[in-house]
Amino acid sequence: MCGDHVVNKVEVDGRMMKMRVCRGVLNQVRSFCELVSSSSSTSTSNRPRIQLENIPTFRSFLSQQQLQQQQQQQQESIATSPSPYYPTTESDIDVDKRKVYIETYGCQQNVSDSEIVLSILSAHGYIQTYDTQTADVILINTCSIRDKAENRVWNRLFELNHASKRLRKEDRPLIAVLGCMAERLKGKLLDYKKGLVHVIAGPDSYRDLPTLLSRVRLTGEAAMNVQLSLDETYADIVPVRTPIVAAENSNENESRRQTISAFLSIQRGCNNMCSFCVVPFTRGRERSRPTETILDEVKALSDQGFREITLLGQNVNNYADRSEISAKWNHKNDQLFSSRKHTTGFQSIWKEKFEDARRFADLLHLVAKVDENMRIRFTSPHPQWFPDEVLHVIRDHANVCNALHLPAQSGSTSCLERMKRGYSRESYDVLLENARKMIPGLFVSTDLIAGFCEETEEEHECTLDLVRQSEFDKAFMFHYSMREKTYASRHLNDNVPSEVKLRRLNEIIQVFHEKLDVKTQQEIGNDHVVLIEGDWNKDPHNYLQGRTDGGRLVAVAKTSTSTTPMQLQLKCSTNRYTFDSSVGIGDYVNVRIDAIRGGTLVGRGIHPIKSLNDYYMSNEL
């Protein structure tokens, strides 16, 4: 029964009386009154006359209902609209509620995105904190590539939710989920448990974060923007490169090691549509940043003292700048390399127009020229986009690291076909052989999946054979995890039992480490160019740590001995990354490997290196 009533005056036998009328039966009352009035006008008897004053008509009732529905729809539109034009002013957010904590899971692209998010929020008055207990906003930048990655995030959200319940309601932080998991699950994150998540933002909606946070503060309702973009690259945003918390644990939050390396996003999205991969659905279509904005950022990083840059993209070596400026640049016949598309023997499932586009080889060459003592890396590539022109740039520039990530995924041609990878096992072998011939001392890493849909024992043996023959320097190995929306989830049968997947994965890992141990022992006596990063966390008093051209960790002895002609001691000055000792963070050192300790190369410094070009020319590398 409706509980909403109105009070109306009623005249009965000449006396005024008040009647409390339920809105839900107003229509019935009005019909009754009309019937009484009609009977009175036709009857000759003197019956009591009943008059209802100010009773709403049925038309009025319908109009009011329509108005309420329009207002409700308008409120829902405001709560879910991705529009960046929702008004956000400085007064919308309490000045004391702007401490933001950000935690990053997953790949290097997520680390770069976290830096972009911090830049956007800092422009709106937010200040980064490294303590969840003092944070007003907690951001979780997520990965969705496998179930394990998402499970870690779910566990972390429950931890944060449990901790926030101990606080007063007005002191509880807002919790936002960003990135691929936000894009994949969307509103399911809000539906799972009320109050678990307050804001959801996909990879292309970070500009809207201040608005979303403000909206939650103002309305108390959760806010979401997961709209993917065809052109968003955040090219105009300068990332805030402060230490990023990789994940929640007791040690990492307080021990934030300074770094001389920077991630620089040059491309977003992926068009490959591999049958197992969810990235095209969480990151959207490919788009590349204008080359000029990338070069400007590289120059700025060089001026700030960074010594290593990693170019990032979901399909990084398919970089293609089709901006107007780049088109004019190519029309001047200044293009350095041909516009050849694929590696020989590889093919793509989609067609693109590459006319007037600056390709990855062009960009890599230009970036390398900005600062010839700044190391250049890139990830994550696809093997189909490694024409000889890219390999030539790596070979010819001393500061472009002799390292390639070549994700194989499987060693079986039939399995690669189901994965829609666009190449055969034989084509992959040819590419790897060609790369190693062209680039001496090449460091090769790969990705491998065990137990993909319908994988047979014969196909698994082909993968083991690939690992034995290829002798990878590094491998990321996982068992297959079905992801929604992918081609495999719709058309293939995930029929390999979990115990079989784990057994095959362990066999791949075992074969890989057997080959790696042999290669590692062969490093004793070799010289490497090592970029010093700081103290070695396993023995900070006696060793520094750095990385080789290929990315391997090296522990370098600090103290001088009769066989070590240099002493490595760090004495920090007030300037960023500058030291008044002979060797410091950000310096290159020629290191000779003397031993292997727990898989880590251990060596001694031979001499500092002032110029990478001079060093490699003198050593004929």
Image (cartoon, grey):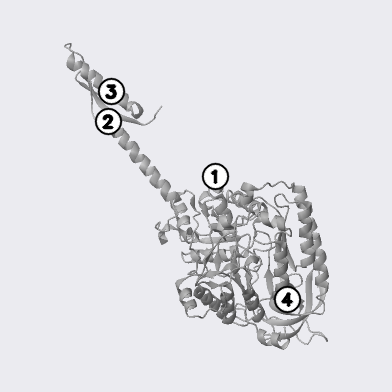
Q: Earlier in the sequence, mark 3 or mark 2?
A: 3
Q: Earlier in the sequence, mark 4 or mark 1?
A: 1
Q: Residue at x 65, y 82 (%)?
A: 579
Determine the residue located farthest toward the front in the rendered image: 345
SS state under label 2:
loop
Residues packed near mark 4 inside 10 Å, few (<14), some (14 to 19) or many (20 plus): few
Q: Which amino acid does label 3 sit on?
A: Ser
Q: What residue type is labelled 4?
A: Lys
Q: Earlier in the sequence, mark 1 or mark 3?
A: 3
Q: Distance between the residues labelled 1 and 3?
A: 45 Å
- Circle 1 is placed at which residue position? 191
Q: How far apart are marks 4 and 1 (CA)?
A: 55 Å
Q: Which of marks 3 and 4 is nearer the N terminus?
A: 3
- Circle 4 is placed at which residue position? 437
Where's the C terminus, which quadrant?
bottom right
Q: What residue type is labelled 1?
A: Asp
Q: Which mark is residue 31?
A: 3
